[in-house]
């Protein structure tokens, strides 16, 4: 990635998809997980992304998906990547990438340095690692809860696989997060919402500006 990549995740309306594209987002995240307030069906993904320029990535966010679920998403022809946000093993991730022919991202839950080190197991199995805050075991969702981890854990970390930073980012702290981690990609969901699952156009625009100050 030659410049900072920005992913706005959990988009579910034409208005917010359009705002993200106009604001300079390089990737759009579309959550296909019924328990999430950001869930969209495969047909919605096709519709929402129909007018999105080819240079903007369209990433389906899925949690421990079956092959049938992935097949229904892949059949839309709309996606440029699959983001695994569950307990998928490196073997499962590699199998999904080989079977469906789409780049695979893997969200890595981080609480301690050991979690970042353990992510090396996915080297060669996925195309990108997304370091996210570890949610409580009792949480209903694996992400999108606005939690953050200690970003200094990534400072100087040796990460061979392309990677990005997620979890607890906001308009107010994204510049600091980039300065601390030197992240090549930042990913935000709840930080640009007015309520769970309701994206705010003004917040999307402000976040993209804050992430890439002129």
Image (cartoon, grey):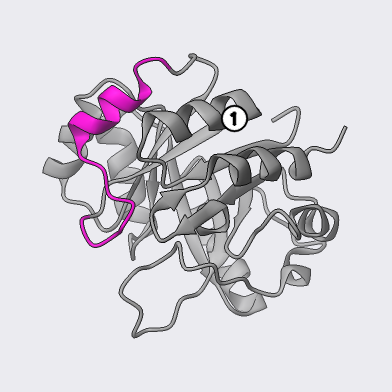
Dot 1 corresponds to which residue?
A: 26
* Residue at the (61%, 65%) spot, across then down: 168
Q: Going by the image, does 211 lie left or right of 22?
A: right
| Rendered image quadrant of residue 71 | top left
Taking the image as drawn, is residue 79 in sight? Answer: yes
Q: Going by the image, does 57 lie left or right of 73?
A: right
Please determine whether, in this image, residue 32 is positioned above or below residue 155: above
* Residue at the (35%, 49%) spot, across then down: 93
Q: Is the N terminus in the top left, top right, bottom left or bottom right quadrant? A: top right
Q: Secondary structure at mark 1?
A: loop
| Rendered image quadrant of residue 47 | top left
In front: 163, or 36? Answer: 36
Q: Is the C terminus in the top left, top right, bottom left or bottom right quadrant? A: top right
In front: 151, or 208? Answer: 208
* Residue at the (74%, 54%) spot, across then down: 174
Please determine whether, in this image, residue 100 is positioned above or below residue 61: above
**Residue 138 magenta-highlighted:** no
In front: 124, or 148? Answer: 148
| Rendered image quadrant of residue 74 | top left
Residue 103 placement (x, y as % from top left):
42, 34
* Residue at the (20%, 34%) spot, across then down: 42
Q: Going by the image, does 182 lie left or right of 27?
A: right
Residue 153 placement (x, y as % from top left):
73, 71
Q: Residue furthest left?
A: 68
Residue 19 placement (x, y as % from top left):
54, 30
Please determine whether, in this image, residue 70 is positioned above or below residue 54: below
| Span colored in magenta | 34-51
């Amino acid at each position: 990635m030659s410049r900072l990549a920005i992913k706005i995740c959990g988009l579910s309306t034409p208005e917010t998809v359009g705002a993200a594209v106009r604001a300079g987002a390089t990737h759009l995240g579309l959550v296909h997980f019924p328990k999430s307030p950001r869930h969209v069906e495969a047909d919605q993904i096709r519709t929402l992304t129909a007018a999105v320029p080819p240079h903007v990535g369209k990433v389906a966010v899925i949690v421990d998906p079956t092959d049938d679920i992935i097949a229904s998403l892949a059949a839309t022809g709309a996606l440029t990547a699959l983001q695994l946000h569950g307990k998928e093993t490196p073997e499962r991730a590699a199998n999904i990438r080989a079977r469906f022919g789409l780049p695979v991202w893997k969200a890595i839950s981080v609480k301690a340095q050991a979690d970042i080190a353990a992510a090396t197991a996915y080297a060669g199995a996925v195309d990108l690692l997304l370091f996210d805050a570890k949610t409580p075991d009792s949480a209903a969702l694996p992400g999108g809860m606005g939690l953050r981890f200690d970003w200094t854990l990534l400072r100087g970390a040796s990460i061979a696989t392309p990677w990005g930073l997620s979890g607890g980012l906001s308009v107010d702290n994204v510049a600091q997060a980039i300065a601390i981690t030197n992240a090549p990609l930042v990913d935000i969901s709840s930080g640009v919402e007015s309520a769970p699952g309701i994206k705010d156009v003004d917040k999307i625009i402000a976040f993209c500006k804050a992430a890439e100050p002129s």
